[in-house]
Image (tube, helix red, strand yellow):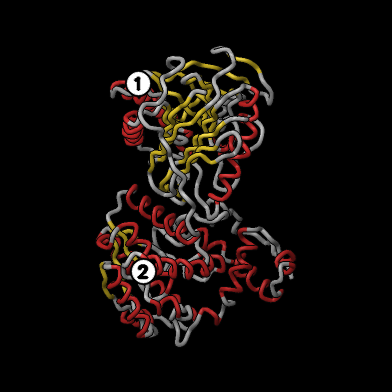
Amino acid sequence: MPTLRLALCQVNPTVGDLAGNADQVRARAREAADAGAQLALFPELMVTGYPVEDLVFRPSFIAASRAALERLAADLAADGLGDLPVVVGYLDADGPPQISSDAQPGRGARNASALLHRGAVVATYYKHHLPNYGVFDEDRYFVPGTTLTVARIGGVDVALTICEDLWQAGGPFAVARQAGVGLVVNINGSPYELNKDDVRLPLVRRRAAEAGATVAYVNMIGGQDELVYDGDSMIVSADGTLLARAPQFVEHLLLHDVELPAARQPAGGDEELADGMRVVRVTVGDIPSPAPPGQVAVGGIIEPVADEAEVWQALVLGLRDYVNKNRIPSVVLGLSGGIDSAVSAAIAVDALGPDRVVGVSLPSQHSSEHSRADAEELAKRTGLVYRTEPIQPMVDAFLANMSLSGVTVENLQARVRGVILMALSNQEGHLVLTTGNKSELAVGYSTLYGDSVGGYNPVKDVWKTLIWRLAKWRNADAGRRGETPPIPESSIGKPPSAELSPGQLDSDTLPDYDVLDPILIGYIDGDLGRDGLIASGHDPAIVDKVLRMVDTAEYKRRQSAPGTKISMKAFGRDRRLPITNRWREHG
């Protein structure tokens, strides 16, 4: 049986940075070639970054993508890498966008992959299954392909597929079996969510069985606005054996020698097969190619990490790339001494380093001494830049000129804090981080233009109960490495409070988070209605109260900062509800 040395290039592209993304391909292709690779694979829309969203509708962007692809093919050959077949994702089009009055049936923008060899684009493939759920809107942007491209490389027939083609039965993988391929390549821009890595391996195994072929699955890493990609690239044989698996959240070159069946079909030409797809065959390079040089390449298998470690890595990478890809020098956030700001600060320091994180204590007359001490202690432990800006004189100035009371005064304190943080942002160039967790955002437990002010929220998609778990895990992880735990134990252990009035606790107006979060998870992530939540064992009166709070806070969430998605249904890209909406889950 022929053996192909595969190079799965798990890299971090940036949307719109076509030259920089191409340079990454050239650099990793060099590493792959130097290691004797015979086929190098790069992620979905690697040339443009992913997702490109409405950039798809700009003819100039599509033209730039095509030109960058052609230039990349030529540059690889000029680099002495022309003999290495390279599969790379890019944006293409064979007609006007579907939103145009000139749109043509079956033509338009294409989510495409190209096979580059000896300075040319020798084959292309258009994504067949287009996802239109969750964060994906590909029916809005792309037209599905109806042709399966099969390239003969080193005496092996290799089918090209893209991302969602793997997630649905039938289509390209079923046709790949009929075409008698030995390897199916699947290039991905698959965003992270908790436990998705547990889903991927069984999924790849199902598609490998459906195709009767080995599957090479390569995924990007990195942050793109709310999305974060975790890599987790892998190779699975036709019988379901996991041959190699890359780590999550880091760039990685996964090299592995795979024994594959020799091609049996005639080379070249095309044919009609089932599922409305046509097969086009091309031959790449010499047949057969020599065996990979040197010792056998074994990619290894990285074992999955604990949920808390996985989420922490996602939050760190998501924030780091949002800041760095947007060329932001530093971040600033309010440090209350509470658990949310402490976890957010620790994430920021891990992402950017302490010198690029400014923590500001913003005490009022209601701020407890232990909260001030906890904020200062966290600053010492993490090494971030720390300062104190008392808000009471500014609050008093408002109260001397306006007659305010009750919740209005509480909101005033939050808004003064927001004004101070935004002033520091304007004056010194920091990005303001807001620190409200998903539970608070769900029930509207935030002040518009106050504690919700900011350009990014690293914990926006993190339930309060998970915030505590993350804090405990991060401290324990520091202890295992012989480092100082970043989060003061008193911040973890004390009852949560906004400290906007004397003796205030979250539990004054909210159920305990151990009660609240399961209701929110069922209603928001699981789309359960009132009856379903009560059938799950929740108290009807508490359910009614919580659902009312969630439903009436939609206008606040619509104005909230973006933040890293880690759940199956994040506010923003995933969960889209009307603000003006009279539907209620009635009790």
Q: Residue at x 29, y 65 (%)?
A: 358
Instruction: State which quarter of the image contains the C terminus.
Output: bottom right
Q: Earlier in the sequence, mark 1 or mark 2?
A: 1
Towards the viewer: 403 or 525: 525
Q: Residues within 10 Å of mark 2 (few under 14, many from 20)?
A: few
Towards the viewer: 13 or 92: 13
- Visible in this render: residue 62? no
Q: Residues within 10 Å of mark 1 (few under 14, many from 20)?
A: some
Q: Residue at x 53, y 49 (%)?
A: 197
| The furthest residue to the front | 295
Q: Residue at x 47, y 62 (%)?
A: 308
Q: CA distance from mark 1 to mark 2?
A: 49 Å
Towards the viewer: 565 or 186: 186
Residue at image mark 1:
82
Q: Amino acid at mark 2?
A: Gly
Relative side of 275 to 411, left or right: right
Secondary structure at badge 1 equals loop
Residue at image mark 2:
479
Above or below, 64 against 122 in this view is below
Relative side of 479 to 518, left or right: left
Where is residue 47 drawn, in percent x and y? 40, 33
Where is residue 221 drawn, in percent x and y? 42, 45
Closer to the eye: label 1 or 2: 2
| The furthest residue to the bottom | 502
